[in-house]
């Protein structure tokens, strides 16, 4: 019944005729009205009182809304209450020296969201960062790692560099060709990695006639051995 009624109404509307007259036939007889700006204190008293009473209520409503949505001030005590932020912090602790893009891929969140959480963690001194070789790397900020240890961990995150360092630890004084044969890379590739390791004072070079031999720097030996053990422990735990 309702459908029939609607059909009839629509048919009448469609068949109705409209007459449009130009406005110029009835020009205004008075000057156009131009509104003027009125200051707040020039408004009627009841309007001013109403506005003054409404503003606190609006602020209270906004505060309650923010609290109900979980929006509250982030402090050192509650900085890890966010599930996403706690997950990022855990990843950094588990993989010291991890860089921005690897974090984004592991956490499966957008880069902008990741940058926000990292900024909050740094603001509250939960993590620290080290910008080297164009990569921004992150570490737990609890005095756990010195600057030298951070450099060692950075190189251990690279699979090829880690194999080179382990090879030199096992065979001190290895030549470029011996390292290349052990790791399975070219001589120029060994030279490139050694340049980076020498700049960070992890490797020292010795000239032996026409050959160059490599040894682990005494300052980096302890940190390197510790870093390799930690990396191996994390690998074992991840497979259990």
Image (cartoon, helix red, strand yellow):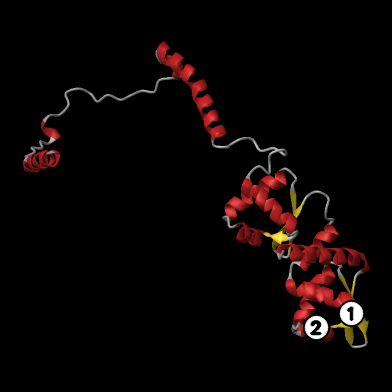
Mark closer to the chain start, 1 or 2: 1
In this view, 215 is above or below 34: below
- Pinpoint residue 191: horizontal percent, then vertical percent: 79, 79
Estimate the x, y position of residue 135 in percent, counting from the top left: 70, 62
Asked if residue 130 shows in the view, the reply is no
Residue assigned mark 2? 182
Label 2 neighbour load within 10 Å: few <14, some 14-19, many 20+:
some
CA gap, disc 1 to disc 2?
10 Å
Q: Is residue 132 visible to us here?
A: yes
Q: Which residue is mark 1?
A: 171
User: Tag 1's secondary structure?
Assistant: loop
- Numbered-mark total: 2
Residue 125 sits in which quadrant? Answer: top right
When the figure is inspected, residue 180 is found, relative to residue 43, above or below; the finding is below
> Which residue is rendered at x = 61% and y = 61% of the image?
105
Q: Tell me if residue 236 comes above or below residue 87 in the rendering.
A: below
Which one is in front, 124 or 183? 183
Density class for disc 1 (Cα within 10 Å; few <14, some 14-19, many ≥20) is some
What residue is rendered at 83% in x and 74% in y? 166
Element type where label 2 sits in the image: helix
Q: Are marks 1 and 2 in contact (CB under 8 Å)?
A: yes
């Amino acid at each position: 019944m309702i459908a029939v009624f609607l059909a009839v109404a629509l048919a009448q509307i469609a068949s109705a005729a409209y007459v449009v007259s130009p406005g110029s036939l009835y020009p205004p007889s008075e000057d156009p009205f131009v509104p003027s700006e009125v200051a707040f204190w020039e408004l009627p008293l009841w309007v001013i009182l109403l506005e003054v009473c409404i503003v606190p209520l609006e602020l209270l409503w906004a505060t309650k809304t923010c609290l109900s949505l979980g929006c509250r001030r982030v402090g050192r005590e509650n900085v890890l209450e966010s599930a996403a932020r706690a997950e990022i912090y855990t990843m950094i602790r588990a993989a010291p020296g991890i860089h921005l893009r690897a974090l984004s891929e592991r956490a499966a969140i957008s880069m902008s969201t990741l940058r926000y959480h990292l900024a909050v963690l740094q603001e509250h001194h939960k993590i620290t960062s080290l910008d080297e070789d164009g990569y921004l790397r992150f570490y737990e900020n609890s005095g756990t790692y010195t600057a030298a240890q951070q450099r060692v961990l950075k190189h251990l995150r690279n699979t090829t560099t880690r194999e080179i360092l382990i090879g030199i630890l096992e065979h001190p004084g290895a030549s470029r060709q011996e390292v290349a044969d052990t790791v399975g890379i070219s001589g120029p590739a060994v030279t490139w990695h050694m340049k980076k390791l020498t700049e960070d004072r992890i490797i020292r070079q010795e000239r032996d006639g026409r050959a160059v031999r490599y040894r682990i720097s005494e300052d980096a030996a302890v940190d390197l051995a510790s870093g390799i053990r930690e990396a191996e422990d994390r690998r074992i735990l991840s497979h259990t």
